[in-house]
Image (cartoon, rainbow, N blue to C red):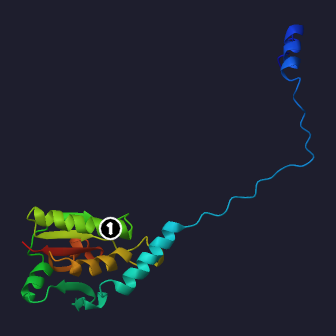
Amino acid sequence: MPVRPPLAEEDRAAFQEAVADAEPLFWDRVHHEPPPPLPIPRLSRLDARAVLHETLHGADLLDLQLEGGDEATWLQTGLPRSLLRDLRRGRWVVQAKLDLHGMNRDEARIAVATFLADCQHRGQRCVRIVHGKGLSSPGREPVLKKLVHGWLPQRREVLAFCQARTIEGGAGAVIVLLAG
């Protein structure tokens, strides 16, 4: 440990003069701050409210028609069923793809709306939306799948949609036909 040289007498005098009117502090108690309050999970509460609102006031997911097992399909009223059959058989060429993996419900809803509007603007008629199978979701439930199936019938540009064929993503994706 290095040894400090002794203070010069003039330095000691200068220090004593500088602190001559200071009063020493004597504390017999230690002041402890109370612990900060726990953070309020405002975003979790907002998300819970959004889920509740969407559940109560969102599109009814029961209007999806189940054909050929448990594959969800939807066809806009008044259109020929052959259109849906051709879509399910892969007769339309998929022109664009959106992958929703890693998004939360709000990000996914904005992404779907933007994607569909952009595709329609570019004249793309058949697109694929990959929503995932929910394998890493709580309870392994496909949250985005159900939401996407509810959002698509609400969009005017959507004429029909069906579950993708196995080579295109199967139960983890939908093929969507857009108005021209």
Above or below residue 126? Residue 71 is below
Residue at position x 22%, y 71% in the image: 167
Above or below residue 65? Residue 9 is above
Residue 149: x and y, percent? 27, 80
Q: Quadrant of the N terminus?
A: top right
One can see residue 23 in this view: yes
- The quarter holding residue 36 reads bottom right
Residue 8: x and y, percent? 87, 8
The mark tally for this picture is 1
One can see residue 140 in this view: no
Residue 13: x and y, percent? 89, 13
Side of 20 relative to 70 (left or right): right
Q: Quadrant of the C terminus?
A: bottom left
Depth check: 112 or 165 in front?
112
Residue type (three-letter) at the residue carrying disc 1: Ala
Residue at position x 75%, y 58% in the image: 34
Q: Which residue is mark 1?
A: 108
Residue at position x 25%, y 85% in the image: 71
Depth check: 48 or 136 in front?
48
Side of 151 relative to 76 (left or right): right
Residue neighbourhood size for the residue with mark 1, other residues' Cα within 10 Å, grouped as few (<14), some (14–19), many (≥20): many
Depth check: 49 or 76 in front?
49
Element under disc 1 = helix
- The quarter holding residue 126 reads bottom left
Residue 44: x and y, percent? 50, 70
Residue at position x 19%, y 68% in the image: 116
- The quarter holding residue 63 reads bottom left
